[in-house]
Amino acid sequence: MTWSTSFFHKLLSALATLLILAGCAGQSQVLKPPQPVDKAGYRVAVLPIENLSGGKAPLKELRKTLEEKVESAGFEVLGEGALDQFMARHRIRHVGGVDEESAKLFAEEEGVKGVLVSSLEFYADSYPPKLVMTSRLVSTGTDPHILWMDSLALSGNDSPGLFETGTVRDAGKLSQQGLQQLAVSLASAREAGFRLDPAKMPQKSFPPRQFFRQGLSPDKRFRVVILPFYNRSGRKYAGEIMALHFLKELQQLGNFQVVEPGMVRNKLLQYRLIMEGGMSNANADVIFDVLQANVVVTGKVLEYQDARGEAGIPVVEFSASMLDKASHMTVLATDSYNTGEERVHFFNIGRISTASCLAGEMIRGIVDRLRQPAVLVNH
Amino acid sequence: MQFRNKRILRARGLAWSMAFLLLIMCLGGCASMQSADGFRDGNMDFGSIRTVEVLPFANLSRDNAAADRVRDVFMTALLSTGAVYVVPVGEVNRGLIRAGISNPAAPSTEEVIKLAGFVKADAVIIGTVKEYGEVRSGSSVGNAVSLSLQMIETQTGRVVWSASTTKGGIGVTDRLFGGGGEPMNAITEKAVDDLVNKLLP
């Protein structure tokens, strides 16, 4: 063997390795199908997807895919026809939550153990395709509560890899990947008995711009009501979306039991509570009484801008406060503003491509502060 | 010869003075907007103020949401000092409706006293956002925030504290290299911190 042929072979093998590695780039999101759980059938109802995207989206197709993924993850899914009949029979129109009455009826009439509520936050099928969705499993029966909650924020150019081999150009493929992720998360949560696993919690966060906290000790338990945020941004449904983000992150704290938003909505309608311009103490008293809560979260979204196209940068700005039942005082006040390119130093590394992901990290920054011991402030 | 040396020395001195003056003028021209003005009632015991209400700010800027943005940041900043308690926005709005105050950005003395009857607060803070957003000077662009606040004691309706601040603007680097100045978020925070420091030194 001459020197040149040996070098040529080495070069070929190096190129082949590179190509293989390039092919693997950005494939971290492709998950193996979840292994079906052997336990006795856990019957769930997959509600139609609530559209908070403010635009058109293939909701039926997404729901169908989600149903399939959930079924393949070992859950017994209530058939679409049966669900439609149930919803028509009980005149259930709101699909963004489950109230007490519906939860009871789901258990009694359909033998359903959990209701999967999904909200679509953002959907784009042009390049780069994007899918942002939040799902939660609500228990049925007399005391409905959130068993599991997870969200996904995927963009086709999240992991471009070498020579852009990791980019996803097809919105359908991205949806398949994302909904598979959700089903895997749901199945693993069920296996863990719907208990929180701190190791699986995301670590990245943005600290708030301003922060005030009084009390809210991590060793005390709180039942918290999250009201839809007052929306001053140009984005439709930004208030509801922000409330969902708070719900997901506060639920992770462990000592915060968040009241199911469907129950909150039902009580707000029942007691005709309209809170234009903020929540007064009188309104808060009614909420505390009818929902047996001891803290209520409210806030304002000033900016909720999703990244459009390839070069767009998401921007989120909001303020939030928490009112305590016992003292009738603000026990948490916070204010945040961040953009998706704050961690970028070169080559777009560290860029956040969706407002959802950014908002999640911003709220995680607040929640991280709540994990620390309380500091008493004298007023 | 001696006379000639004296003339040279005098000319050199004049040149140095001119150069120094020119430098001062250049630096003056490059200076960004900064201000430090305010009023503090010497007879007022600020330690007795435990609860304050922050009324909606007047907005003189082009951004419709500027007053809301600045008010939110200011309220949280004031609360986070731990020195005073800030009444929640919803409770303030309820008080304004009950007191029948039509222009909360500029209430009269009687209206402030009436409002205090509904919402238990020791003082009321009113404010005006004078500038919020992009400012231009020739081809240079920068962000600026300008706001003024007043604190009114609720028992007497007297103004006990007043201050204003302006942050941002077009700096030396913006004039020389462009770049658009500091982000709005950062200068809003600076302006609010400046006012909080003036109120609670």
Image: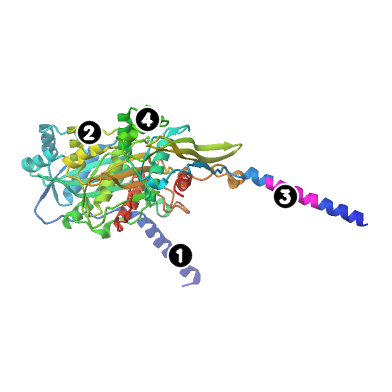
Q: Amino acid at mark 1?
A: Leu
* N-terminal-most mark, 2 or 1: 1
Q: Which of the two residues, A107 or A69, is positioned nearer the viewer here?
A: A107
- Residue extending farthest to the right is B1
Same chain under badges 1 and 3? The reply is no
Q: Is residue A153 visible?
A: yes
What subunit carries mark 2? A
Provide the residue designation for mark 3. B20
Left or right of A116? Residue B133 is right
Magenta span: B13-24
Q: Is residue A314 visible?
A: no
Q: Are marks 2 and 4 in contact (CB under 8 Å)?
A: no
Provide the residue designation for mark 4. B111
Q: Calculate the distance from the C-alpha at mark 2 to the C-alpha at mark 3.
A: 68 Å
What subunit carries mark 1? A
The quadrant holding residue A196 is bottom left
- The mark tally for this picture is 4
Provide the residue designation for mark 1. A11
Prevailing secondary structure class for the magenta stretch in the rendered image: helix
What label sits on residue A273 in the rendered view?
2
Q: Calculate the distance from the C-alpha at mark 2 to the C-alpha at mark 1.
A: 72 Å
Queried whether the magenta region covers residue B17, the answer comes back as yes
Asked which colour scheme the image uses, the reply is: rainbow
* N-terminal-most mark, 4 or 3: 3
Q: Nearer the viewer, mark 1 or mark 4?
A: 4
Q: Amino acid at mark 3?
A: Phe
